[in-house]
Amino acid sequence: MITKALGPCQCDKSERSCPAVSAPDPRTEALTRLFCPDCQGMLVPSMDRPGDLRAPVNCLDCGAQYGAERGAIELHGRDGRPTSRIREYPHQGKTLPFWEFYEQTLRLGAYRDTDLEDEVFALLGWLDHDPGDPILLVGAGRGELLATVAEACPDSTIVALDDSVDELRIARKRLTRQGSENCAYIACDLDRPPLRPGSFKVVLHFGVLHGLQNPLDHLRRFAPVVPPGGRVAGVALARSNLPRIAEAQQMMSAGTGLKWVPMQAFGTALMKVGWRSFRHEQPSNWMARFVAIRGGL
Ligand SMILES: [Zn+2]
């Protein structure tokens, strides 16, 4: 059963929705869990524009300044490497940017057997978090699934990461229209996000694994971000159990670097790199949902 914490004024609303207290600022909450990508120093909002969500963010240690125009903080390091993730996908002999590819695959009915909103609720069920726990969302994109998460978890601060600041701005507009104010938007390298150890016990991971050069190495590096017992749940393109489709997937992988993750073997390998439990379901021939529990308890 889900019980809501009472607000400090003893009304029957949770702290975030209690009219007697001001809601915590999700951006300030997010910054306590992030670090400077150049020196791992502490990040703080610009002192001269307190409360302004478009004000830049400063590193207290090395003095670096990170822009936040239009409400998404750009935490890219000095090396200027915005992402190591595959952003172009193969489609009918051509290479398309992800969003064009996504629209084309929707037209072909690739996700006809998958209701993405249902996926979100299945994953939230696996995460089984306490109301109010901050949620990290890796791979926010244009906010389709983020919108569902933000509405389903109004008492949580949701820290939404993507490597494209343009897509985060689209997401932010969508969430603002919807009236969701519990999200912070951070652009960074999704393969090496600048997150403090133990900063999130609840993580959603949307459609990112299959675009990384080494998904296993990513979750090995990511493990310290999650405290023992914490969970990462997500969706990824998965190697089909049908040989004919698996063969087609491997041919597409060879030309592009995009991966269809072999979920069973992936889960077994995770047990050696900081995770103690892994479960996956493969509701379609192309996609799997998964949850991994951090080891160390
Ligand atoms: Zn710094």
Image (cartoon, grey):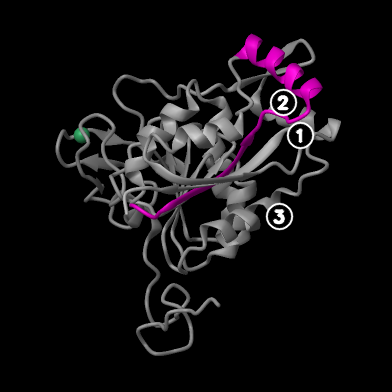
Dot 2 alpha-carbon crowd within 10 angstroms: few under 14, some 14 to 19, many 20 or more = some
- Is residue 165 visible in the rendered image? The answer is no
Number of numbered discs present?
3
**Residue 270 x/y as whole percent:** 45, 36
- Is residue 236 depicted above or below 173 in this figure? above
Q: Please tell me the numbered disc located at residue 231.
A: none
Q: Which residue is mark 3?
A: 118
Dot 3 alpha-carbon crowd within 10 angstroms: few under 14, some 14 to 19, many 20 or more = few
Q: Amino acid at mark 3?
A: Asp
Q: Residue at x 66, y 40 (%)?
A: 288
Q: Quadrant of residue 194?
A: top left
**Residue 171 x/y as whole percent:** 57, 45
- Pick the quarter of the image with the N terminus: bottom right
C-alpha separation, residue under disc 1 versus residue under disc 3: 17 Å
- Pick the quarter of the image with the C terminus: bottom left
Tell me whether the residue at label 2 lies in contact with that at label 1, contact meaning CB atoms closer than 8 angstroms: no
Q: What is the secondary structure assignment of the residue under circle 2?
A: helix
Q: Which residue is mark 1?
A: 285
C-alpha separation, residue under disc 2 versus residue under disc 1: 18 Å
Q: What is the secondary structure assignment of the residue under circle 3?
A: helix
Q: Is mark 2 within 8 Å of ligand 1?
A: no
Tell us which disc is closer to us: 1 or 3. Answer: 1
- The magenta stretch is 228-256
Find ligand 1 in the image and state its quadrant.
Answer: top left
Q: Which residue is mark 2?
A: 101
**Residue 150 x/y as whole percent:** 55, 59
Q: Residue at x 45, y 81 (%)?
A: 19
Q: Amino acid at mark 2?
A: Phe
Q: Residue at x 64, y 10 (%)?
A: 254
Q: Of label 2 and label 1, which has the lower sequence position?
A: 2
Q: Residue at x 58, y 49 (%)?
A: 173
